[in-house]
Image: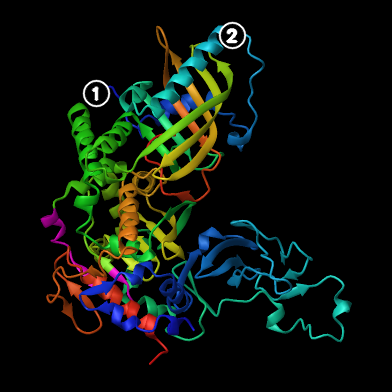
Amino acid sequence: MLQERVPNIAKLVEPDRVHRLCYADPDIFELEIRQIFEKTWQYCGHESQIPKTGDFWTFQIGRQPTVMVRGHDGNISVLYNRCPHRGVQVCGSRNGNAGAALTCPYHSWRFHLDGSIESVPLEKGYLGTRFDRENPAFHMKKAARVDSYRGFIFANLAADGPTLTEFLGEARIAIDDMCDRSPVGKVKVVFPCNRVVQRSNWKFFMENQIDAMHPSSTHMSTGQAAAEVERKIGRETGEKPLHYHMLSAFTTPFDKWDLLETVGYPYGHTILTGYMGLRPTDRDTLEHEAILEKAYGKAKKDEFLSRNIHHCLLYPAVSIQSPLQQLRVLRPQAANRTLSEIWHFRLVGAPEAIYRRSLWYFNLVNSPSTLVNADDLENWQRGQWGLTSDGGDWVSFHRDFGRDQDDGQVIRSTNGCSEAPMRSQFRAWLKYMTAGTA
Amino acid sequence: MATKKKIGKVAESAKKVAPSTFERAMKKVGVTAPKAKPATNWDLHQEIEAFLFRQSEMLDAKQWAAYIDLFANDGVYWAPSLPEHEHWDGKPAIFIEDRDLMSVRMKRVLHPNAWSQQAEWATNHIVSNIAIEHVGKDGTIQVRSRFHMMEMRRDDLRHFGGIYRHTLKRTKDSFLIQLQRVDLFNAQAAYEYVLQVWV
């Protein structure tokens, strides 16, 4: 048992520091896959990725190759992407349309879009054998649980545990904050997503997203370069395009970032408040606000737009930047290797200009030619190397320790640069990793 | 207001360029064969070839400012996410930059605190299969070529390849790039790390 191979896991996590092996040890990574990724609600994709009957999208939950499929009744199934006959992967492309049934390329076993068996060639050959078309062992295996929230589809490979609603808890505000910016409460994916591999542990990403201390240091080069060109354009044209501000905001000094706030929830979800000052009052924004007011009334609109989220993380693998309609989901591959899918959403019914604005962010920050994440990935890789060394055993999460507002469940900090969200994530991590061993 | 246009506002002028740049009728513009007949104007062909070779050498020599200066004032460098994208307007892209955004990229990589630039890295570009697809009455030239870029970063090698489509404007003694469209053949493969400068 893996838990026996990593017997002292509780000793690796202290309230103010964690052992480097949490990031670097392959056995601990395998245990994370079993205890966290294959037992919690994992983001599969958005329903608009598979709008038509037979549409499918493949991805990975933990170690399991999975596929989500739109059925004849409109329902979405999440299946293990393998044929029960000889184990061959049924859907061979990242996405596509299966037609009326899923067909295994090897011996033409066919499955209904919910994974149950449709037909097997020469079925009479199985007469008198243990083959039984009613037995789920001869179907494409289903994820134990599938649920969705406002079009965002999640699956859980474990039958037990909290429901999706319980799991998301208050952190569902990330999805609400995105959808409520549409006058009809809906978003649609923009194809295609970007996929980037970081050669570092998945937790580097999850910690970095709510680490308000890092931008001024990591992204100073981009912030200053963009600020310079932004000033030049301002001089030449009398106006500064908003997308330059998305980059020049990285020149914000440490003490300004410290004015933000952090919230850490019991299942590991975390929020960094603030919006990098991107609350403009230009014509496009005002038009958007008017559309929202017409749809929801003034009180609701004000409530929706007063939410204050920079990043919201749905532990362990989703990061949502709701004001800019971007979502990143991690598919960890090894202790030192993590694939991320980066998605952009369109607000249904919102002005085109609002979409163009968030598209700038997607193209400048979240594309493979990112002007921003290049330095993040570099720093995390160097971090991974450092944590693989014997130069020291502990990762320090001491900043503002002892000043957390901690009710035993939710950990808040009124210092944006506090390491409270990392402490909160590791409290959840330890619970997941030791579950079932007590 | 200065006369210089910014991306997002150049859409109209670019739309004029686009129809002659791309075969609009073909959906998969990135994977069609060149439209060119065998070259008849070898002087022009050789002049363009020298221009493209020089451009790629500038990348490999990290002469960023000279590289940006190959673009017209309203020139655009665009690497679409998908070959069927006929215009950048409203589409996600791998790169979409006018000269101002290109200079942000240049200033970033030259900044002493661009941490990712501390790693040793270099590229090696090969440009080939050059075909002049169209010479317009206004002197605008559409050129298609293939490229192969190897990139060394620390101890790793990566490969990128694909199709360049240059829309060139004649100048007195050379050309200016109105639009460079770069269709990476591996644009949709997962990126091991990211791209820090132009391909």
Chain bearing tag 1 is: B
Quadrant of the image containing the C terminus of chain A:
bottom left
- Residue found 42% across the figure and 76% down from its top: A36
Badge 2, how many Cα within 10 Å: few under 14, some, many 20+? few
- Residue found 76% across the figure and 73% down from its top: A118
Proximity of marks 2 and 1: CB atoms separated by less than 8 Å: no
Decide which of B62, A43 is in the foreground and name it. B62
Residue A279 in view of the camera? no
Residue type at the position of mark 2 = Trp
Q: Is residue A260 magenta?
A: yes
The coloring applied to the image is rainbow
Q: Position of residue A88 (x, y in %)?
A: 69, 66
Chain bearing tag 2 is: B
**Count of labels in the image:** 2
Which image quarter: residue B110?
A: top left
Badge 1, how many Cα within 10 Å: few under 14, some, many 20+? few
Q: Which mark is residue A50?
A: none
The magenta region covers A254-270
Distance in Å between CA atoms under marks 2 and 1: 40 Å
Mark 1 element type: loop
- Residue found 29% across the figure and 42% down from its top: B118
The residue where tag 2 is placed is: B42
Q: Nearest to the eye among marks 2 and 1: give it.
A: 2
Q: Position of residue A270 (x, y in %)?
A: 29, 70
Residue type at the position of mark 1 = Ala
Decide which of A364, A241 is in the foreground and name it. A364
The residue where tag 1 is placed is: B2
Q: Position of residue B3 (x, y in %)?
A: 28, 22
Residue A229 in view of the camera? yes
